[in-house]
Image: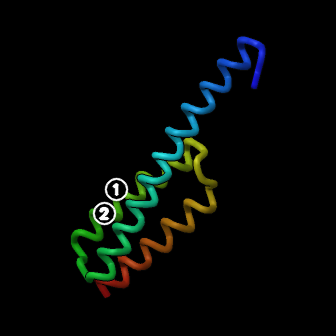
Amino acid sequence: MANIKSAIKRVDINEKKRVLNQSKKSEMRSAIKNVEKLVEANDVENAKVALKNTIKQIDKAVQKGLIQQNSGNRQKSRLTKKVNNLGA
């Protein structure tokens, strides 16, 4: 454990950020699973609405540094492809 006051503060801040990042990442993953579930159920309208919200969450996660740019783009691309194939 850290002895210096500033190092102790840093440990506290890092723990708070870790918990916050973890919850945001979990929300994003849940949103992705929700879109995939709607695609499985062939629910086109709700899937499109859910996709829009999910893309927003993925973009925010990339912006905050929770996931890498390529990873976010790949997830968005795959989800969009699945939703677009429903309409065809």
Q: Is residue 35 visible?
A: yes
- 49 in relation to 6, above or below: below
Q: According to the image, label 1 marks what residue?
A: 53
Q: Name the residue at 63% across, 54% down.
A: 68
State whether residue 60 appears in this view: no
Counting every numbered tag in the picture gives 2
* Whether label 2 touches label 1, CB < 8 Å: yes
Q: Position of residue 61 (x, y in %)?
A: 52, 48
- The percent position of residue 84, horizontal first and vertical second, equals 36, 79
| Residue 38 rendering spot, x and y as whole percentages | 29, 74
Q: Which quadrant holds residue 4? A: top right
Quarter of the image holding residue 3? top right
Q: Residues within 10 Å of mark 1 (few under 14, many from 20)?
A: some
Q: Residues within 10 Å of mark 2 (few under 14, many from 20)?
A: some
Task: Tell me, for residue 50, which label it has, or none.
Answer: 2
Which of 23 and 56 lies nearest the eye of the viewer?
23
SS at circle 1: helix
- The quadrant of the rendering that contains the N terminus is top right
SS for callout 2: helix
Q: CA distance from mark 2 to mark 1?
A: 5 Å
Which residue is at 50% across, 51% downward?
25
- Residue type at tag 2: Ala
Figure check: 1 above or below 53? above
**Residue 76 appears at what percent x and percent y?**
48, 65
Residue at 56 percent of width and 63 percent of height: 73
Residue that lies at the very extreme toward the front in this rendered image:
1
Judged left or right of residue 43, residue 82 is: right
Q: Among all residues in the image, which is located at the extreme top?
A: 5
Q: Is residue 44 above or below residue 3?
A: below
Q: Residue at x 23, y 78 (%)?
A: 43
